[in-house]
Amino acid sequence: MRIEHYFTVITLSLFSIVCAACEKADLVLHNTTIYTANDAQWTAEAMASLDGKIVFVGANEAAKKYMCGKANIIDMAGNTVFAGFTDGHQHLEGVGKRTKTLSLFGLPTLKQTVQEIENWASSIPENNWVLGRGWIEREWTDEQRFLTKHDVDAFTKNKPLFMPRADGVSALVNSKALQLAGVNRNTPDPEGGKFERDATGELTGYVLANAMNVFRNIIPQETDEYLKDNLLKGMQVNVSMGWTQTHDAGMSYRLVDLMQQLHEEGEMLHRIYAAIPVQEAQQRFKRGREKTNDDMLDVRGIKVFIDGTLGSRGAALIENYSDAAHNGFMNRITQQALVPILEEALKAGVQIQTHVIGDRAVRSLLNWYENAYTAVPKSQWENQDLRWRMEHAQVITPDDQQRFVELNVLPSMQPSHGIGDLNFARERLGDERLAYAYPWKSLVDKGLKIIAGSDAPVEVGDPRIEFYAAVARKRLDGTLGEGWHPELAVSRETALKMLTIWPAYGAFQEHLRGSVEVGKYADFTVFNRDIMTVDEADILSADVVMTIVNGQVVYTREGK
Ligand SMILES: [Zn+2]
């Protein structure tokens, strides 16, 4: 008996030594600091994953048992690993398309603008359209005149060109575009538009208002191939920025179907959580929620535009603008049209995401949400845990901030909008309202989970900028504007949650991802600097070293 027992002990010990020698993993990151976004274990030195899921988080020493077999072992010395960053609000197709058209915003001279157009045109194949936008002559320091076909014809002989000015209501076209459109000196101006002509009656290539449609109509329609390529390019841009997931704020079913194709073809680079535009709400109710088994694509919500933007004075305010005799507009959908959709959404378990910027739009939607909650008995709700969202939510009165808590509504905000808009928000809102504009810290202090995002391609779509804006609340050059309320900035720990675990919560995925915990998906963003500890200004110069989704390395910085 005794010997037998002794023997058993030895066998067991040997068995555990063998086991300890090699635990199965296919990816190990070690020798680093991992910021997990998990309060219970905020940092770790190493992690191991298998088949896309995390199997170990802890110390280097303990990770050794996974550093064997077929595991891809990556020494992260000098780099810092973060729970995978999520862009909580963006438009993927637009992010991809942006890579295919030229932006001329912010160029200081006419000469440089023309040079940029020439460089761009040289990259476009013969007979294809040279597209761009955003030139604005009054900001040029050399010459302040409209561009004409004479500026660009020499290098675009066989390439039609169409480039709207920054205001979007006039454009530059070249001789090739005029020829393709059949417009010549004898063509009359269209109703509500104008082909500009010189003193001799010759067309200059500067066209205004409805005259732009003549060209828009002959630019090839966006084919499925074109859109699919935009989606793919958008994902390439996103993973190079370090995003492991994006929340798409309005992905049409045409795009969703293309995304499904990309998923089947194994071309998805990061996860996508998508909301359908309200125009396709009925289709959403019919098709139901669509989710791939690997959680790469999850189509769940409905996105609704309510008001405009603060910059254009289109955001709906309770009181008048401080610099205009009106209080903005809520004219993008009527209450009458939206209420039945809200009620149907409750019954179907659809998450609602409304674009609301001004305090009147926010308040109105809190009311509409609440009315819908009352109108539909809870027993008829598909999901009691609604997590309906408000996108942007830039101006929220203190009373209404508390209602977010009571109604379980999630604010989805863009820190970069804050630091951009604060340059003119004081003129629009006045000092009193500025105290509750972009009120990140106030909301967090109330216990709300803010979903942070970039709204790319409106903003760059760069997690460093969003993180910096949230914690610094300063311009990118480090300066602070008057009345910017630096006390509304958040801590780095909070900013990290705003870009990781809280967007996961906003997508009902906090049990799957958003933090580095055993059992969750192995999604990581790796920077060459520790943005939790470096000087504030240095956050912006951290580089993305690697992006990992589902345990797969989907991006590495060239040469590293
Ligand atoms: Zn948006």
Image (tube, rainbow, N blue to C red):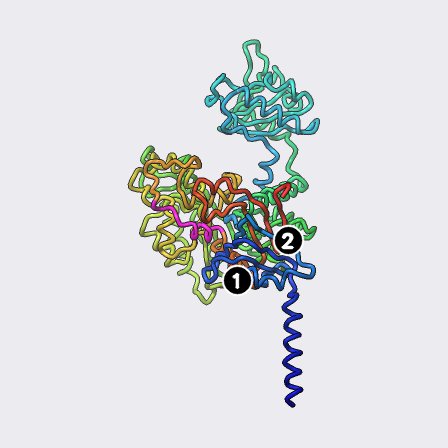
Q: How many angstroms separate mark 2 from mark 1 (CA)?
A: 20 Å
Q: Is residue 224 above or below residue 124?
A: below
Q: Which residue is mark 1?
A: 511
Badge nearest the viewer, 2 or 1: 2
- Residue 198 found in image quarter: top right
Q: Amino acid at mark 1?
A: His
Q: Is residue 335 left or right of residue 100?
A: left
User: Residue 260, labelled with which disc?
Assistant: none
Q: Is residue 68 left or right of residue 520?
A: right
Q: How many marks?
A: 2
Q: Is residue 57 magenta?
A: no
Instruction: Name the chief secondary structure element in magenta.
Output: helix
Q: Quadrant of the N terminus?
A: bottom right
- Residue at left 50%, top 57%? 36
User: Can you give x and y, in whole percent of width and height, for residue 101 in the image?
Assistant: 59, 32
Q: Which residue is mark 2?
A: 552
Magenta-colored span: 487-499
